[in-house]
């Protein structure tokens, strides 16, 4: 039975495009990382694209917009904020192109000619944002896609023809990048960013044709012709974005978001940053911009941002450090990364003090799987133990482990899903975990197996019985309800401690009364002087109190 070919891109098709693109990028992220030799051989292009699209999908799931306009705007904002590296910023401009065209046309769906306008707008926005455009890069592939779409729009105007023509032109342009840049020719690879861009628009093609993600399909031609790539062996930055590769380039990647500015000051910012380094991209507007540049003088770049408006959400990466874990620097087989998926300032501080890596989400809230895997890669470790502080976090950790596996790293996700279990696991592992990864995972599971956990939650609209707004759970079972948080918390603790216990961990979350920890600790002291109590304020949202008893 033939699949139905779409004639318009509506909000449902847009959502399917994001889901499909994210799946395809996840499949090929590791391959794209290995191809990444320009402008810096830091092996992160696939990861950066995946993180950017991952955040887009996360935003769609959270906000669940039902109309094309709001959906496109939400995606544009999410990808701009989450954009990592050159490739992520340029990808965000494809999404911004969708949002701008939808806003200008004010339609519930885009036809073929409208989508051709999207391709052209995306190419224009990306090229305009790059300080020193270079051919043979992601920009070239985007321009070819726009030209192919334009030709089809002028002839038939059908959506399927526009998208097919864009993909055909982009595919030819991508293969040609091997000869356009010396560094690509020497390495024998296509441009990694261009390959990622092609994957994203091929996802649209599959949606328009009614097909599934490419999981399990034949090897893409761009990957086949890049087999046997000669990965650069010298860690460090390469030369100017505008003049090809070479040693002695800037040592740092600087990224930040810029608010409270305007077009004039943003233009001045570009002029200030241009002589400081290379790979300059400034994209976005009119309320928010993302800035990316490679420099040696980090302070000068940050000061330039401060003069242009309000810079925030800074990211400074030294390329030599970043290349740990790429093909340029051997993975550290002895180092095991301990990654803790917890939220809340107090809990994060404790986990970091124990030496754990705590990933942060670009848009706030829980990090995505791609963001977690990127943190492990940045550590240079060949393996990782991923510790989850909630059931939702464990789902993210499991997906991150899959991504890490495709990049040649190993990861275990022990059966823990509670803040106190994460802290217990970190204590057992110690600052330098010793042993094989499976043994470490087993060690963690043994440590948390006998731990009893509970949670106190504030229920909106009242609790399970009249007059109650507080719910107490032990494990996964509802144990009690009441009207006072401290009363429910102390009753839960009494029930847990009736079966024994020497160590109690209590973590107060957002929305907990200011005196909750004091009341709980006082109750525990009165109950038994022999108890060892750890009390942590600032445990994130979702619960008033998390309790662990060992």
Image: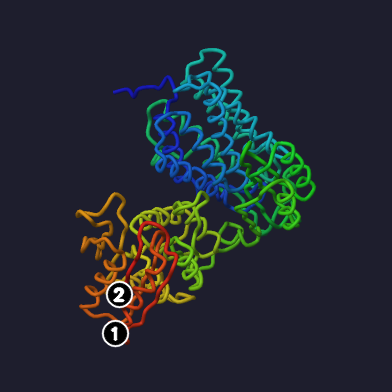
Q: Which mark is residue 528?
A: 1
Q: Residue furthest front?
A: 467
Q: Position of residue 379 (x, y in %)?
A: 54, 63
> In the picture, which quadrant includes the N terminus?
top left
Q: With respect to residue 306, does 500 lie above or below?
A: below
Q: Position of residue 428 (x, y in %)?
A: 39, 76
Q: Nearer the viewer, residue 261 or 453?
A: 261
Q: Are marks 2 and 1 in contact (CB under 8 Å)?
A: no
Q: Secondary structure at mark 1?
A: loop
- 498 left or right of 152? left
Label whose residue precedes the other's in the sequence (2 or 1):
1
Q: With respect to residue 344, does 502 lie above or below?
A: below
Q: With respect to residue 317, does 337 lie above or below?
A: below
Q: Which mark is residue 27?
A: none
Cα separation between marks 2 and 1: 14 Å
Colour mapping used in the image: rainbow
Residue in the picture at 27% in, 68% down: 487
Q: Nearer the viewer, residue 178 or 294?
A: 294
Which class describes the residues within 10 Å of circle 2: few (<14), some (14-19), or many (20+)? many
Q: Position of residue 258 (x, y in %)?
A: 65, 46
Name the front one of labels 2 and 1: 1
Residue that carries the numbered disc 2 in the rendered image:
549
- 110 left or right of 392? right
> In the picture, which quadrant includes the C terminus?
bottom left
Q: Secondary structure at mark 2?
A: strand
Residue in the picture at 49% in, 33% down: 72
Which class describes the residues within 10 Å of circle 1: few (<14), some (14-19), or many (20+)? few
């Amino acid at each position: 039975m033939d699949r139905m070919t779409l004639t318009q891109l509506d909000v449902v098709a847009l959502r399917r495009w994001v889901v499909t693109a994210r799946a395809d990028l996840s499949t090929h992220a590791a391959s794209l990382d290995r191809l990444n030799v320009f402008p810096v051989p830091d092996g992160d292009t696939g990861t950066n694209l995946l993180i950017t699209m991952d955040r887009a999908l996360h935003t769609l799931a959270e906000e669940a917009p039902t109309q094309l306009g709001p959906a496109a705007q939400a995606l544009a904002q999410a990808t701009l904020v989450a954009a990592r590296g050159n490739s992520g910023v340029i990808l965000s401009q494809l999404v911004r192109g969708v949002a701008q065209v939808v806003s200008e046309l004010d339609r519930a769906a885009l036809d073929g000619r409208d989508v051709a306008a999207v391709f052209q707008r995306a190419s224009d926005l990306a090229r305009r944002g790059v300080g020193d455009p270079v051919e043979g890069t992601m920009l070239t592939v985007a321009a070819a896609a726009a030209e192919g779409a334009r030709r089809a729009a002028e002839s038939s105007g059908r959506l399927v023809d526009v998208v097919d023509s864009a993909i055909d032109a982009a595919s030819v342009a991508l293969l040609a990048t091997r000869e356009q840049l010396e560094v690509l020719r020497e390495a024998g690879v296509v441009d990694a960013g261009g390959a990622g861009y092609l994957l994203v628009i091929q996802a649209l093609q599959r949606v328009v044709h009614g097909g599934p993600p490419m999981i399990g399909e034949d090897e893409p031609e761009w990957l086949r012709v890049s087999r046997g790539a000669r990965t650069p062996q010298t860690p460090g930055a390469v030369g100017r974005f505008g003049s090809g590769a070479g040693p002695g380039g800037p040592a740092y990647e600087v990224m930040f978001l810029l608010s409270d500015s305007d077009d004039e000051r943003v233009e001045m910012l570009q002029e200030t940053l241009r002589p400081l380094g290379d790979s300059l991209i400034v994209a976005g507007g009119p309320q928010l911009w993302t800035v990316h540049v490679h420099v040696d003088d980090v302070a000068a770049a940050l000061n330039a941002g401060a003069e242009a408006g309000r810079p925030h959400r800074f990211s400074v990466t030294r390329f030599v450090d970043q290349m740990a874990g790429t093909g340029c620097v051997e993975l550290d087989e002895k180092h095991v990364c301990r990654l803790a998926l917890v939220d809340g300032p107090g809990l994060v501080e404790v986990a970091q003090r124990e030496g754990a890596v705590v990933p942060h989400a670009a848009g706030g809230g829980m990090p995505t799987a791609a963001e977690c895997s990127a943190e492990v890669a940045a550590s240079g470790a060949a393996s990782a133990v991923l510790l989850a502080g909630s059931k939702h976090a464990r789902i993210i950790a499991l997906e991150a482990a899959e991504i890490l596996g495709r990049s040649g790293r190993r990861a275990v996700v022990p059966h823990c899903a509670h803040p106190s279990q994460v802290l217990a696991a970190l204590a057992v592992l110690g600052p330098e975990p010793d042993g094989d990864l499976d043994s470490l995972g087993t060690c963690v599971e043994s440590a948390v197996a006998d731990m009893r956990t509970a949670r106190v939650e504030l229920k909106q609209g009242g609790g399970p019985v009249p007059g109650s707004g507080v719910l107490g759970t032990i494990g996964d079972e509802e144990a009690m309800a009441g009207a006072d948080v401290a009363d429910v918390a102390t009753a839960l603790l009494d029930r847990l401690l009736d079966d024994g216990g020497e160590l109690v961990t209590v973590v107060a979350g957002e929305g907990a009364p200011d005196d909750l920890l004091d009341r709980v600790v006082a109750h525990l002291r009165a109950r038994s002087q022999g108890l060892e109590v750890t009390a942590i304020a600032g445990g994130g949202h979702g619960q008033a109190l998390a309790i662990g008893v060992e």
